[in-house]
Image (cartoon, rainbow, N blue to C red):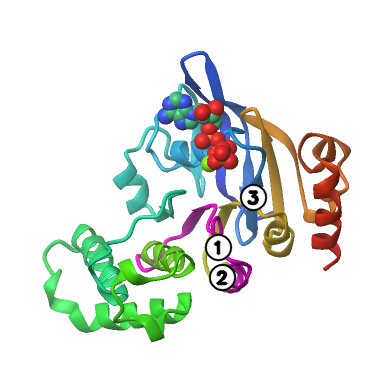
Amino acid sequence: MTEAVLRTENLTKRFGGLTAVDNLSLNLPGRRLHAIIGPNGAGKTTFFNLVSGLLAADSGRVFFQGRDITGLKPHEVSRLGIKRTMQIKSVFPQLSVAENLWVTRHATKRVLHPFRAASSDLETRERVEHTLEQIGLTALAQRPAGTLSYGDVALLEIGMAVISEPRLLLLDEPTCGMSPAETERAVAKIKQLARTIDIVIIEHDMSVVFEIADDITVMAQGGILASGNPDEISGDERVREAYLGRPEDEDYVEEAIHA
Ligand SMILES: Nc1ncnc2c1ncn2[C@@H]1O[C@H](COP(=O)(O)OP(=O)(O)OP(=O)(O)O)[C@@H](O)[C@H]1O
Ligand SMILES: [Mg+2]
C-alpha cells in the first residue's frame, strides 16, 4: 500500500457547542482522486480549513506524506505543497487571466527563492503558458478576469493553485454554480490534473463524484458515515438513507453510476 498523502488522527473542531469535525480519522492514499461528499454542514469545508491551517484543531493530528503538519500556519502548509481553492471564488478582476497566474507564480517564487525573484521571467512565462493549457484558458489569456464566465473563473482559480506546482490540491466544490457544459469541461481538466497531482475534492454534484472519484468518503455530522469506491458507496444502505436516499435523488444516482 502506498503511503498516505493525507492522514488525520482523531481530528476535532468545535464552534461553541457545535462539533463541526468530530474525532475524524482519515487515511487517503496517494495517486488516487478522493471525493468527500456529505450534506450541508457535515464539516467538509472545516476539514479543509484544519488541513490547510486556516483553523486550529481542538484536538487530533494531521499528517501530510507522513509529516506531522498539525498547528502549522496557512503559509507554512502552502509552502509544503498543499494548495486549495475556496468555496467562494477569488481572483483579481482587473488583471487579465495570464496576469492573475503571473502574479500568483511570482508570489510563490519570492517565498521559495527570495534573492532571484526577478531573474527568471522566462521560466515564469513558460509556467503561465503551461498552466493556461492545463486549465484550458489559453484562448482567454488576455481577458480581464472580471469579465470571465463563472465556470472560467473557477478554472482560473484552479490554475492559480496549480501554478505553484502543489503536491496536494484541495478543491472545495469546484463545479458549484457551473452550467452542465462548464461542469463537463472542468471535470475533464480535473481528471487530467489528477494524473500528476494528488487531489481531494469536495463535491455536491453526484454525477461528478461518481465520474471522477477513485475513492469516496461520506461525511455526516463531522464524522465518517462511509468510505469506499463509487460502487461500494452507491450500494451502501446507510449512505442511501442518510444522503442519497431521497427518491428524487435515487434515479439521479443510478443514472450517474451507470452512465
Ligand atoms: N467559523 C465558523 N464559526 C462557527 N461555526 C462554523 C464555522 N465554520 C463552520 N461552522 C459550522 O460548522 C458546521 C460545518 O460547517 P462546514 O462549512 O464545514 O460544512 P460543509 O460540510 O462544508 O457544508 P456545505 O456543504 O454547506 O459547504 C456547520 O454547522 C457550520 O455552520
Ligand atoms: Mg463547505
Q: Is residue 207 left or right of residue 118?
A: right
- Where in the figure is residue 207, as x and y percent of width and height? 72, 60
Q: Are marks 1 and 3 in contact (CB under 8 Å)?
A: no
Mark 1–mark 2 Cα distance, whole angstroms, equals 6 Å
Q: Is residue 108 left or right of residue 195?
A: left
| SS for dot 1 | loop
Q: Which one is in front, 139 or 66?
A: 139
User: Magenta stretch containing residue 212, yes or no?
Assistant: no
Q: Which one is in front, 87 or 143?
A: 143
Assess disc 2: are there few (<14), some (14-19) or many (≥20) residues with their C-alpha within 10 Å of its C-alpha. some
Start and end of the magenta stretch? 163-191
Residue 67 shows in the view: yes
Q: Picture quarter containing residue 145?
A: bottom left
Give the residue displayed 76% in from the left and 39% down from the top.
Answer: 243
- Where in the figure is residue 165, as x and y percent of width and height? 39, 66
Disc 3: which residue? 204
| SS for dot 3 | loop
User: Magenta stretch containing residue 183, yes or no?
Assistant: yes
Eye-nearest disc, 1 or 3:
1
Give the residue displayed 58% in from the left and 53% down from the top.
Answer: 201
Kind of residue sitting beneath label 3: His
Q: Are marks 1 and 2 in contact (CB under 8 Å)?
A: yes
Assess disc 1: are there few (<14), some (14-19) or many (≥20) residues with their C-alpha within 10 Å of its C-alpha. some
Disc 2: which residue? 182
Badge 3 residue CB within 8 Å of ligand 1: yes
Q: Is residue 80 left or right of residue 222?
A: left
Kind of residue sitting beneath label 1: Met
Q: In the drawing, what numbered circle is on residue 178?
A: 1
| SS for dot 2 | helix
Residue 57 shows in the view: no
Kind of residue sitting beneath label 2: Glu
